[in-house]
Image: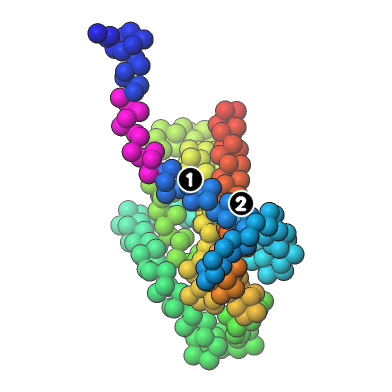
Amino acid sequence: MGHAGTPHGSMRHRLRHSLYVAPALALVALFVYYPIVENVRLSLFKFSVFKPGMRYVGLDNYRQAVADPVFWQALLNNVFYAVTSVVFQVGAALVLAAVLEEAVGRRLRGLLRTVYFVPAAVSMTVAGLLFQFLYQPDAGLVNSALKAVGLGSLQHDWLGDAATSIWGVINMSQWQSFGYTTMLLTVAMQRIPRELYEAATVDGAGRVRTFFTVTVPMVREMTTLLVILTISGAFLVFNEVMVMTGGGPSNSSQVLGTWLYASAFTGDDMGYAAAIGTVMFLITFAAGAVQLLHSRRKAATA
């Protein structure tokens, strides 16, 4: 009989561990990787949910996407979404978290954390309907507030104008997610050893310099995770747009997720929808991979 220190015992040890993780790996393969592979396969066909048969078309669905102006508008809207989300949900949230930790009293800090986190607890559908009312041209709070402070000339049909509809949706998303990312960064900051801040103070560093030399490097892992999740979420966004604008007016607020839905269930072009889904996967996978590689290189050179 082999012992744990022998090659035979070590092999049995590894096999036992493999058996423990096998069910989880099987579930991940079945519900994550298999759908991805199947979606890529389906993107090479033309087919309908209402008619039998599938016709192989190769890369024609991807060529259709390249020639589709709505696809490019949707992709651009996702880019706007991602850039704005990184700036506010990561950058601005990082600054706010530092302020809450270093410049606010303990009692007020707890109150402000609750205030900032409340929007994250609101249902996406409820938040979308709330902002629909706020943006309403005649009775909405936004236009009413502008009129009340003498800026009536800036009143606007925010969701009904092709130039501003997507920004109305983006604003709602930032309002809802900002407090959540702030709380995550606050938790990360609480784990920073206080000795580092004391050493920075002894060296004569002010709050701004301490923020960039101590706080930012020490929360790099959480920041990297939030950037990946934020960018991925921005390219997978769906509910906000469907609730507030449905992709209108004139497809001006379409994102890849809503255009995929419209192509599949309104246009009955399932192969083209699968191609859009593949593009969404490739974008989010590439964004995550680049950010992880960049973070690891920084950590290696630090």
On the image, numbered disc 1 is attached to which residue?
A: 33
Q: Residues within 10 Å of mark 2 (few under 14, many from 20)?
A: some
Under tag 2, what secondary structure?
Answer: helix
Magenta extent: 16-27
Q: Which mark is residue 147?
A: none
Left or right: 19 as drawn, with respect to 242? left
Image side of residue 166 versus residue 27, left or right: right
**Near-viewer residue (232 or 259):** 259
Quadrant placement of the C terminus: top right
Question: Residue 261, position in %: x, y?
Answer: 54, 68
In the rendered image, the residue lying farthest to the bottom is 138
Residue type, mark 2 in image:
Ile
Name the spot of residue 211 as percent of width and height, x first.
Answer: 52, 44
Mostly what secondary structure, the magenta segment? helix
Q: Residue at x 71, y 67 (%)?
A: 68
Residue 143 visible to an observer of this rendering: yes
Left or right for 75, reference 295:
right
- The residues bearing labels 2 and 1 have C-alpha atoms spaced at a distance of 16 Å
- Write the residue at 49% across / 80% down: 132
Instruction: Return the residue at label 2.
Output: 283
Height in image: 118 above or below 226? below
Q: Residue at x 55, y 85 (%)?
A: 143
Q: Secondary structure at mark 1?
A: helix
Q: Position of residue 162 (x, y in %)?
A: 65, 78
Most distant residue in the right direction: 67
| Residue located farthest toward the front when viewing the structure as drawn | 53
